[in-house]
Image (cartoon, rainbow, N blue to C red):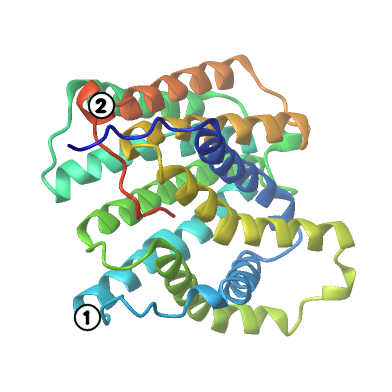
Amino acid sequence: MSSAPARPSLTAYGCLALSMSLVGSYVALTKPLALVFPVFLLAWLRFGIGAVAMAHWLRKPADEPALTPPTRRLLFLESFLGNFLFTLCMISGVKLTTAVSAGVIMAAIPAAVALLSWLFLRERVAPRVWAGVACAVLGIGLLSLAQVPRATAGAPGSHNLSWLGNLLLVGAVLCAASYAVIGKKRTGALGPRRISSLINLWGFALTTPFGLWLARDFDFAAVAPGMWVLLLFYALAACMWTVWLWMTGLKSVPAAQAGVFTVLLPISAALVGVGVLGEPLSGAQGLAFGVALAGVLLATLPSRAALRVRPASSADAN
């Protein structure tokens, strides 16, 4: 007789919540980093720190099958879209707009995953999820109509380019969604830690030529100590901490239910933007934020059938 699945603990829920909160926080905190480091140099340093920190994750487990050529191609594509291009679009976008705007746009990731899964994997999309997609589009549309204050739009002289920053963040959303869709297509033979370390290594390789070129003339001594601490937090949070926390939570929480915690990504990004970076929150931005959160919930709230599915012990996460 099979026993009923164990009820998820508060610790599991806490890990999922902290994972998404960290994602939102580091998205917002890349703004001051992007004002100090050139975009490609910042990306290279991020991947380099991650490569050192995750070196022990690269080791192939004895029971893991060898990488096949199709798997290698999918891993490279995951890294190119979900790591390399995502990081560049995200850093460049946050630099030109506000952290609050970044939170609103990043809230569209679950809707984008559903849309790309429908387009490329022919997955069925429930009407409620389509409503979530509509909310995501509406939230971004409302955000585009909001006026971004010149003092907080981004780098000096970039206040007229907030539209470009928002567009780059939409590109980051599509890159993140592509990563998730490719992850669905790829077989689950590899553990999530090794996947994360491999795609981070690809990201480091792709950014190395640009990073070395920019590092030649960059004055590293002029960087304040606080920026180095922030860079270390960003790299470790993006590469390791969020991955480990998400995997830990998924051990006892069904993936469909865990998706609801993505609502904390835009909330934490907005809180950091307003509370730490001193960004104002206009009425139009607040309305866009509310619509975006509604879209996240519509796209991720699990059905009753999904809640009855026993969580996998080796779920994939990024």
In the depicted view, which residue is nearer to us: 221 or 263? 263
The residue drawn where x is 34% and y is 25% is 301
- Closer to the camera: disc 1 or disc 2? 1
* Among numbered discs 1 and 2, the one appearing first in the sequence: 1
In what quadrant of the picture does the N terminus appear?
A: top left
Disc 2 target residue: 129
Please, what secondary structure does the residue beneath circle 1 have?
loop
Position of 77 relative to 131 (above/below):
below
Dot 1, crowdedness within 10 Å: few (<14), some or many (≥20)? few
Residue 291 position in % (x across, y down) = 44, 19
Tell whether 71 sits left or right of 258: left
Looking at the rendered structure, the kind of residue marked 2 is Val
Disc 1 target residue: 68
In the depicted view, which residue is nearer to us: 82 or 316? 316
Residue 142 position in % (x across, y down) = 46, 22
Please, what secondary structure does the residue beneath circle 2 have?
helix
User: How far apart are the two marked residues, 1 and 2, measured between alpha carbons?
Assistant: 35 Å
In the depicted view, which residue is nearer to us: 224 or 56? 56
Looking at the rendered structure, the kind of residue marked 1 is Thr
The residue drawn where x is 50% and y is 55% is 89
Residue 171 position in % (x across, y down) = 41, 50
